[in-house]
Amino acid sequence: MEAFYSAIHWERYVSLFLIFSTMLNTASAVTHYSIPEEMEEGSVVANLAADLGLDVKTLTKRKMRLEIISNKKYLDVNKETGELYIVERIDREFICAIKTSTSCYLKMEAIIENPKRIFYIEIEIMDINDNAPHFRRDTIDLDISEATQAGERFSVNNAVDPDVGSNSVKTYLLSESDHFTIDIQTGRDGSKFADLILKKALDREAQAVHNLILTAVDGGVPARTGTASIIVRVLDTNDNAPQFDKETYNIYVMENSPIGSLVVKLNGTDLDEGPNSDILYSYSLYTSEITQNTFGLNSNTGEITVKEMINYEDFRMYDMEVIATDKGIHSLSGQCKLKIIVTDMNDNHPEISIKSFQSPVKENVAVDTVIAVVSVGDKDSGENGVVDIKIQKNLPFALRESSDNYYELVVSEPLDREKVPEYDITFTVTDRGSPALSDNETMTLELLDVNDNVPQFPQSFYTIPVTENNAPGALLSSLTAFDPDLHENQYLVYFIIEKEIVNTSMSMLFSINPENGNLYALKTFDYEIEKEFLFHIEARDSGVPPLSSNVTVHIVIVDQNDNTPVIVSPWRAHGSVVEEKIPRSTDKGSLVSKVIAIDTDSVQNSRITYQFLQVTDATLFSLDQYNGEIRTMRMFSYRDPRHQRLVVIAKDNGEPALSATVTIKLSTVETAVKAYSDMTEVPLEYDIFSDLNLYLVIGLGSVSFLLLITIFVTCVLKCQKPKPSKAAPPCRNSVISERNSTIADSTLVSNDAYWYSLFLAETRKGKLVVRQPVPKGSRYIVSSIPRSTGLTETSDSAASTLQV
């Protein structure tokens, strides 16, 4: 805005003063120009060469120069164009700092040579509104008494503005105020100043300080402003009398209060300040001499204290009047009345006396039974002599008033010694005085135990794993029960509840320590014969009558890998080698032989895998590791030896693994055995069932008949029993382990040292049922296998028929 404003004025002034300078030139030979201040450097004022009538082309040759008189060089002449231009920013307020008039000039001489001529030039600097009004002090402090009358005038500092004319201070503004206004005055030199006028009386107690803002505004376009803060502090006058919080005080004081103790502190206040608010306290003539002798009054603090011993029986109430006077020149005062009431002192403690007390008592004592009788009393009178009695909360006891000041302690809830063996009962008596006094007495009630808790086992069911082949007398587990009762009610004895399993008593298999519940095994267990036992253990305390509980014990026999695999096919006598014959024309993939091994262990320990331990030619035969089948991997060549030796190892999956081996010697023949290829079922069966087999069949029939008779008699005896034992586990002697094998039509079980079993041996041409011995001590079920018409069936159709 200022630049725009300056440009407009500059054009105006240049055009006017060019005409004026031409007229002045002829008259006084002085060239006059008028420009606004603050023009930008390089701005052209006028074409001086043209105004002076000089040829522009000769300015350089004639060495035209510009000299300033008594000032800095703010302007210069362009010798190429003859233009007068601004060299440095012109500040009118700096050049004409001393205001003798509103005009400000720059005087200079333009000098040229050949011939030498001097031209006088006068530049008038026109003012622009580039300065805001300001006060010599930013804050004006005034102290005005609250007793000052309205209309009073107060001088404040006027604002100054370096600008002149209409750009100087034009008026003043005052911030909104209920108590003050301003009056604007004009000086002889045209300057403006303001007087502060009080238009409403002040009240220091309502507002002690008034903050005003005085604003000076100049007449420029746009206008500029400056502000000053006026702080008016209101001086106090003693126009307020002291006041008390209340007009009347009722105060209670205890008899026998210590001398010097505080009764009350009076709080007199005065809204004035300084000496006008300082207060002195005194008794009025209305206060009796006895009251003034009994209670002392501090004149500076207003504290009333006990001066002599107070006796409730002499005086029960004191009346007094206190006056508060300020220290102003014309002092003011206020008063209040006090009524001091003496209260009786509660100086006697209540008393408690236990008349009867029964301890110990049995824990099963009946509810509402009286345990103790107590009496209470207090030597004081009135409320100070009224006594209340109580015991702790959350106790299974209650107090019941029987007569005046007599109370009975009774059982309110069933007692349990196992939860709380004894109680500390505290009787607390308190009177109703102020402050209340109390006393207490504690008695201990002990509970006697009764046998009311049965022994408890940590678990309701115990599963105890026992590895087979254990040593007799080994500790299996500790079955310890807990009884929370005491003494003989807590002493426990452990028993095995008798139970027979296959005519065998549990006491013959297991033993328990009657004192600590340690369970022992009396024999060595064999998983292949006995797999688990189920029985009960009883714990009985020694109370009268005794209480007992029992727990179920499940003994699980854990299998060990204690049985070596037995190779039952191809069978051979101990230490002998199995010899087989095979045609040299055998095709690739033909079944040569099948190794079958059995293991009487269980699960992992009975899983058999087969491997070649030795083989004459590894490229000729293959062995299935799971079913033991030996097959040809290729046809025989003329280079292959006629005799092949195969050593097969059968290994179980136990830790550590056990194994057995068989050696098979294969002899190759040029032609197939005619007896195998031409064999039919009738000659085969006739050949198999020799005289010895006939005796075997007769024996088998006899054993089967005896077995049926035994089963029939057993069923009759079972039916005659009133109630079969549910807890008896199944007979383990008749349990047959399951195996992945095919069970056929008839079975035979035997424990004899040397029995015959029927095993399946496959050949290239068909199946043969052969007789093979079983090692002594082994127990097997032997099954016959249905015949098959296939010539080269695998083990899936002719699986092992042997079961443990």
Image: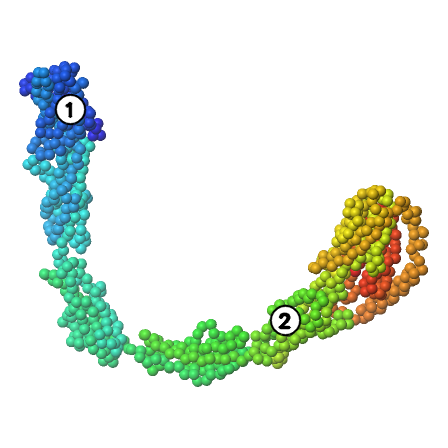
Note whether residue 3 is visible: yes
Q: Which residue is at 8% across, 18% downward?
A: 117
Q: Earlier in the sequence, mark 2 or mark 1?
A: 1
Amino acid marked by disc 2: Ser
Task: Tell me the number on the disc at residue 625.
Answer: none
Q: Label 2 neighbourhood size at 10 Å, few (<14), some (14-19), many (20+)?
A: few
Judging from the image, what secondary structure is the residue with disc 1 in?
strand
Task: Tell me the number on the disc at residue 478.
Answer: 2
Q: Which residue is at 10% across, 32% downward?
A: 96
Front one among 706 and 77: 77
Indicate the position of residue 418 as horizontal and vertical percent values. 54, 75
Residue assigned mark 1 = 76
Amino acid marked by disc 1: Asp
Q: Is residue 66 left or right of residue 562?
A: left
Residue 560 quadrant: bottom right
Indicate the position of residue 729 as horizontal and vertical percent values. 74, 67
Q: Which quadrant would the C terminus be assigned to in this image?
A: bottom right
Q: Quick one: which residue is furthest to the bottom in this view?
A: 355
Q: Is residue 336 left or right of residue 738?
A: left
Q: Which residue is at 10% across, 45% downward?
A: 155
